[in-house]
Image: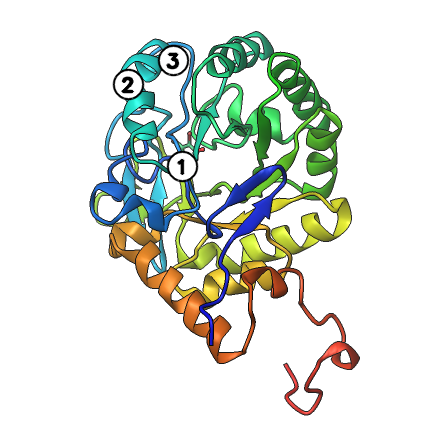
């Protein structure tokens, strides 16, 4: 039997496979792919870049939690000038579609960043990060408001024809209305989820395990939350949505695809297993062969929503 076709479309982007390396989990973007052949990835998302360089938050900036980790990194990055000069050429040289992640502290900064990224060569897309939990302005504060999300997306899409993806926060009551606002603002794709606000306490020292009290929770603990948000968003908006959060196995990635994700984000898993993308991709290919699917696209959105929809009703879910 022929090997299954792993290519997917995420909005206007054609990816050789559904695995997308999530922002912020590989230095500026290229640390992970140095360990394995980069072409095993469908795309890479850079660390989110701001107009000016940033040091980030005071340490400690990461803390392990049961089945996950907290980060309070605080958006450290070299700023758009250094990104353009030093980082982007290195990312592009990996030969994988590069999505540049941007965050502003005002709408004007988002506009500036969109114009700067628009003029770079070899940009597959622009991720508009309206979901960082570790900054006091912009980030999740903007992305928790449908009106501000709409305005930010309009500011960005007014400056570029590149494929714009809005990365959304799960720290909201109704992610669907935020996703709809982003699409109305001109986003072509959506991405869920950024990290969940969390905290952990060192009881002996009676202090937070992070330098700035709270941080963003990622890792397997958040997989069910990501999945529910992905499913709701994909179903309600019909938008091409990347699903991620807590993917550490082929089954975890397949769950997102089955629930309707066009592509799957991998991030925190690589802190435990730097080769996670290799193992997850192999596992997806094995699954497709085992279930005799010719293409990964056949499983996308194939979720049975009632027992009557099951192809094998006797195998109750
Ligand atoms: O840098 C961070 O603190 C950070 C960012 Br920009 C983000 O989008 N999500 C996150 O958990 N941390």
Labels 2 and 1 touching (C-beta < 8 A):
no
Helix, strand or loop at mark 3: helix
Helix, strand or loop at mark 2: loop
Q: Which mark is residue 80?
A: 3
Confirm if mark 1 falls within 8 A of ligand 1: no
Q: Residue at x 64, y 57 (%)?
A: 260
Q: Earlier in the sequence, mark 2 or mark 1?
A: 2
Query: Mark 1 highlights which residue?
Result: 214
Helix, strand or loop at mark 1: loop
Mark 1 Cα shell of 10 Å, populated few (<14), some (14-19), many (≥20) = many
Mark 2 Cα shell of 10 Å, populated few (<14), some (14-19), many (≥20) = few
Alpha carbon distance from label 3 to label 2 = 14 Å
Q: Nearer the viewer, residue 238 or 48?
A: 238
Query: Mark 2 highlights which residue?
Result: 55
Q: Earlier in the sequence, mark 3 or mark 1?
A: 3
* Image position, residue 274 (x, y; %): 24, 52
Alpha carbon distance from label 2 to label 1 = 18 Å
* In this rendering, position of residue 272 left or right of residue 223: left
- Residue placed furthest toward the front: 2
Image quadrant in which the C terminus is located: bottom right
* Image position, residue 11 (x, y; %): 63, 40
């Amino acid at each position: 039997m022929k090997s299954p076709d792993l290519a997917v479309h995420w909005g206007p982007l054609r990816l050789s496979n559904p695995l997308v390396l999530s922002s912020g989990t590989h230095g500026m973007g290229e640390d992970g792919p140095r360990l394995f052949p980069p072409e095993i990835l469908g795309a890479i998302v850079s660390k989110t870049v701001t107009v000016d360089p940033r040091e980030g938050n005071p340490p400690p900036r990461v803390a392990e939690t049961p089945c996950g980790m907290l980060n309070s990194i605080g958006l450290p990055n070299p700023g758009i000038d250094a990104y353009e000069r030093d980082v982007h050429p290195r990312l592009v040289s990996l030969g994988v579609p590069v999505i540049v992640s941007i965050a502003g502290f005002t709408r004007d900064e988002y506009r500036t960043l969109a114009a700067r990224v628009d003029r770079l060569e070899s940009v597959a897309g622009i991720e508009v990060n309206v979901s960082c939990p570790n900054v006091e302005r912009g980030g999740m504060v903007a992305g928790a408001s449908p009106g501000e999300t709409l305005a930010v997306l309009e500011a960005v899409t007014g400056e570029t024809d590149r494929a714009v993806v809005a990365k959304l926060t799960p720290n909201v009551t109704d992610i669907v209305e935020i996703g709809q606002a982003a699409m109305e603002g001109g986003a072509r794709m959506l991405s869920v989820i950024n990290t969940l606000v969390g905290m952990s306490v060192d009881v002996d020292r009676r202090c937070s395990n992070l330098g700035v009290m709270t941080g963003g929770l990622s890792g397997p603990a958040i997989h069910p939350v990501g999945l529910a948000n992905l499913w709701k968003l994909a179903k309600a908006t019909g938008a091409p949505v990347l699903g991620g959060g807590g993917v550490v196995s082929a089954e975890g990635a397949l769950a997102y695809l089955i629930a309707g994700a066009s592509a799957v984000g991998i991030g925190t898993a690589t802190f435990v297993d730097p080769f996670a993308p290799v193992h997850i991709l192999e596992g997806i290919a094995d699954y497709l062969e085992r279930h005799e699917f010719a293409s990964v696209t056949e499983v996308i959105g194939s979720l049975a929503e009632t027992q009557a929809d099951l192809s094998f009703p006797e195998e109750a879910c």
